[in-house]
């Protein structure tokens, strides 16, 4: 992967953690750079960005507190997504990640092509969220 795309991926990753870009802004920048999606792995604290040709780059994420709970709570994940979408004053990606892990979320796959996010637990249970129109 070329250095420019790696830099864009790194900037988007950092912007999510420091709150300087919203999810829609991050998605827009990644799509413009040619990415088709990414995966967040809370157990490895990594984020992998994918190009359509199969190339990818894995970046280390800032670890969030807590471990991934054994049981996956899809309704809590849905509530957390709504909280993130509302973007209230108490929202941060770090807090979202900590709460998602406590709800048993081991990670999630963002598909720009499918316009959805698939959240998954340790036992491969899933919750799917479609991008808002």
Image: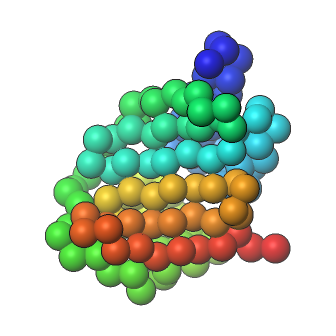
Is 23 above or below relative to 77? above
Return the x and y of residue 110 as percentages of the image width and height.
Answer: 58, 55
For residue 53, what is the image quadrant?
top right
Above or below, 54 against 117 in this view is above
- Give coordinates of residue 122: x percent, y percent: 25, 64
In percent of width and height, residue 5 lies at 68, 23
Report if residue 102 is visible in the image: no
Along the viewing direction, whichever of 120 and 14 lies nearer the viewer? 120
- Seen in the image, is 129 located left or right of residue 36? left
In the foreground, 46 or 21? 46
From the viewer's side, name the closer residue of 87 and 55. Answer: 55
* Residue 59, placed above or below residue 47: above
* Quadrant in which the C terminus appears: bottom right
**Looking at the image, which residue is at 53% across and 74% down?**
128
The figure's colour scheme reads: rainbow
Q: Is residue 5 visible?
A: yes
In the image, farthest residue toward the top: 3
Which residue is painted at 69% across and 62% down in the image? 114
Relative side of 132 to 104, left or right: right
User: Which residue shows up at 45% across the image and 30% down it?
Assistant: 59
Give the x, y percent position of residue 1: 62, 19
């Amino acid at each position: 992967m070329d250095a420019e795309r790696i830099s864009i991926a790194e900037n988007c990753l950092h912007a999510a953690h420091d709150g300087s870009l919203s999810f829609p802004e991050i998605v827009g920048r990644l799509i413009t750079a040619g990415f088709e999606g990414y995966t967040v792995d809370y157990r490895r604290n990594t984020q992998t960005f994918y190009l359509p040709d199969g190339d990818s780059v894995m970046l280390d994420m800032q670890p969030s507190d807590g471990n991934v709970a054994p049981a996956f709570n899809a309704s809590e994940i849905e509530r957390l997504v709504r909280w993130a979408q509302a973007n209230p004053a108490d929202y941060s990606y770090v807090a979202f990640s900590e709460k998602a892990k406590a709800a048993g979320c081991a990670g999630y796959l963002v598909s720009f092509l499918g316009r959805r996010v698939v959240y998954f637990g340790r036992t491969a249970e899933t919750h799917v969220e479609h991008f808002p129109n």
